[in-house]
Amino acid sequence: TDHDLRYKILRENTLSKEQPTKNLETKGAKEAFEPARSAVRFLSVALVIIALLGISLSPLIVKGMAFGFASNPAKYSLTVYLTSIMFPYVFFICLVALCMGILNAMDHFAAPSLAPVLLNISMIAAIYIVSFYTTSKAERIIGLSVGVLVGGILQLAFQVPFLIKKGFYFWKKARFFHPELKNIWVLMLPAVFGSGVYQINAVVMKLLASMLPEGSISYLYYSDRLVQFPLGIFAISMGTAVLPSLSRQVASGDPDAVKETFSYALKLVFFIMVPAMVGLIVLREPIVRLLFERGEFDPHATRMTATALMYFAMGIWAVGAVRILVPTFYAMQDSKTPVIMAVFYAVINIVLGLILMKPLGHCGLALAMSISSVCHFFLLLWALRKKMGPLGIWSVIKSICKTVVCSSIMGICVWKISLNVISCESSSFLTLFFGIMGSIAASILIYWLLSYITKSQELEYLMSMTGRSGTKSEQET
């Protein structure tokens, strides 16, 4: 068929290009590690230059990203100073990302997944330590920025022993610019541009938020952190883990296996993200109150953040699905299509943000993000079907229908339960904590029972995974 012919051409193009994953499969670790070492050295030099430019141009960067701060000289000066302190973090986190990619190509996911924990620990420790020595808000914020920088160093240092254990030795000889880096750059540049689109979009949204009442940026930030929690634990991890498998299946010329892997990954993401969306919407205010309401974070801030969380959560399923769609394109060495769709996503997001921020304030920006994420998902899905032909979407729709029904019933039950177990705003921390934990436990149990009754294949798969002892290599993968 026409789709089979296009897939054959795609496969031939894939096999004709040298890439780290293919080198690892066909030439062995030694051949694959040499261009990887060159990439580490080349990127290190480039990042040093970028970090130095970022430090020197901090005033211009702050003016460009949040010109609403210019009306407050103290806020503007502090933001410039914090930017100068944290810009070297770019050097460490980019090298961390490269090291993660090398480890993922060797089917090692544990260390890359745990590394971000070190950043959180470093930030928490920095705030905790600084609070003993000063009561100044500005000095505490500066201490936190130092914690971010230390967290970047720790993340990079954490990857090194695992790379050495896999046989990747940084000190071995390698050319500064390996010939195969050219092929990597050709594939990477569209992806870099696509990432740039996302970053530009984030900058524009912050810029719009800076023109809203004070606190709007914070409300959006805190609510987004809560949305990123389920995304980071499952959707992003799934996208990272599925990429090497999809790459091998494409290289082996097995389109049916690619479609099957994609379809099942999508079902699993929906199986987790839809109930997560419902849970965040139902328990949004108690969760925000438990995590943030203390000190200067008052009940008003809780309500503003919780409302933004509701609008952000509406699109969490689409964001999770995009984390599966984009790696599928990358596995087929198509990095241009995700970029094109990312541009559409950014334009839709910015236009909707401008329209909705006037009547809804910061919540309009959150709603714009959710709507644009849904559009992004359908655009990518349409493009993938055009490239590969039928994707077995009907089986995905059938699975989604079960998930939506189970999640809806779960949401109603948990809402009723939360009215009884979660006390009023004046309740103590422990009372609130146990009330929320009880509601979450009830939601998990109800969702599990409903999924079991409806004979969900995704539940059976997850249960088989948790019940499987497995070998050491299986657990690491």
Image: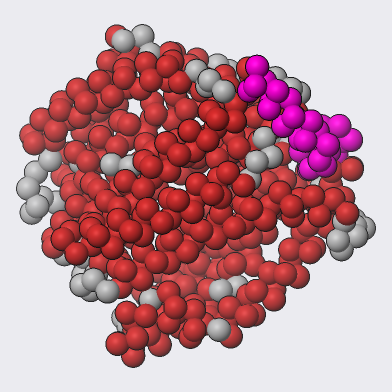
Between 166 and 317, which is closer to the camera in this rendering? 317
Left or right side of 174 for 353: left
Can see residue 109? no
> Which coloring applies here?
secondary structure
Residue shown at 74% from the left, 29% from the top: 9
Q: Is residue 21 magenta?
A: yes
Q: Position of residue 189 (x, y in %)?
A: 67, 56
What type of secondary structure mainly makes up the magenta span?
A: helix
Which contiguous range is marked in magenta? 1-29
Q: Position of residue 346 (x, y in %)?
A: 43, 55
Between 6 and 468, which is closer to the camera in this rendering? 6
Between 184 and 410, which is closer to the camera in this rendering? 184
Residue 203 occupies which quadrant of the picture?
bottom left
Instruction: Check the picture and name the quadrant holding the N terminus.
Output: top right
Instruction: Check the picture and name the quadrant holding the C terminus.
Output: top right
Left or right side of 1 for 268: left
Q: Position of residue 49 (x, y in %)?
A: 69, 76
From this view, report whether residue 341 is shown above or below residue 476.
below
From this view, report whether residue 79 is shown above or below residue 464.
below
Residue closest to the far bottom = 73
Q: Position of residue 158 (x, y in %)?
A: 65, 53
Left or right side of 374 for 81: right
